[in-house]
Amino acid sequence: MSEHNPSSDSIDQMRKGTTTLAILKLLLDAGEPMHGYRMIQELEARSRGIFAFNEGLIYPRLHQMEHDGLLKSRWEGDPGTRRRKVYVVTEKGRRQLEAEMEQWDTFRRGMGFLLGLEGAG
């Protein structure tokens, strides 16, 4: 019987809700196109191993973000070689990131006050 770890489950749910934000920030910070597998590696490294990202989470999210106009993609590599689909952030994606970063900061500050982690003023 496997042990249920509610802490891990909660972290997974929070991560799923912030994956779009994390991908947009990663791509803009990188300043270059990235393919999905590299994004997975970079996101896990950025979280210092706290969050595990997998293909079943990232690739559907990338496709949805592209459909929503937040990302655009292109294929890299010569015909006959292994080609990779790489992604870049669109102007709409930049605006969304800016809005979500403001919301995240407000949420973070509010939770800090609520939990007594930040002083008033």
Image: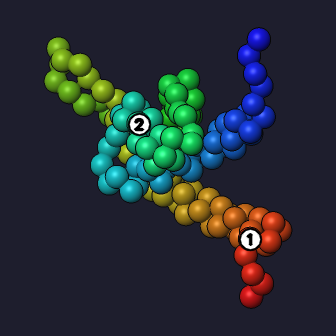
The kind of secondary structure element at disc 1 is: loop
Placement of 88 over or under 60, stated as above or below? below
- Label 2: which residue? 41
Foreground residue, 86 or 56? 56
- Residue at 64% x, 42% y: name it: 15
Please state which of the two labelled residues, at mark 2 or mark 1, is closer to the viewer.
Answer: 1
Number of numbered discs visible in the structure rendering: 2
Placement of 97 over or under 19, stated as above or below? below
Can residue 37 be seen in this snapshot? yes
- Label 1: which residue? 117
Instruction: Identify the residue at the far right of this view.
Output: 114
What amino acid is found at the position of numbered circle 1 in the picture?
Leu
Please state if 3 lies on the left or on the right of 63 as rendered: right
Can residue 99 be seen in this snapshot? no
Q: To which quarter of the image does residue 37 belong?
A: top left
- Residue at 41% x, 36% y: name it: 41
Coordinates of residue 64 in the picture (x, y in percent): 56, 34
Q: Are marks 2 and 1 in contact (CB under 8 Å)?
A: no
What amino acid is found at the position of numbered circle 2 in the picture?
Gln
- Residue at 80% x, 71% y: name it: 116
- Residue at 47% x, 54% y: name it: 25
Foreground residue, 5 or 38? 5
* Alpha carbons under labels 2 and 1: distance apart: 31 Å
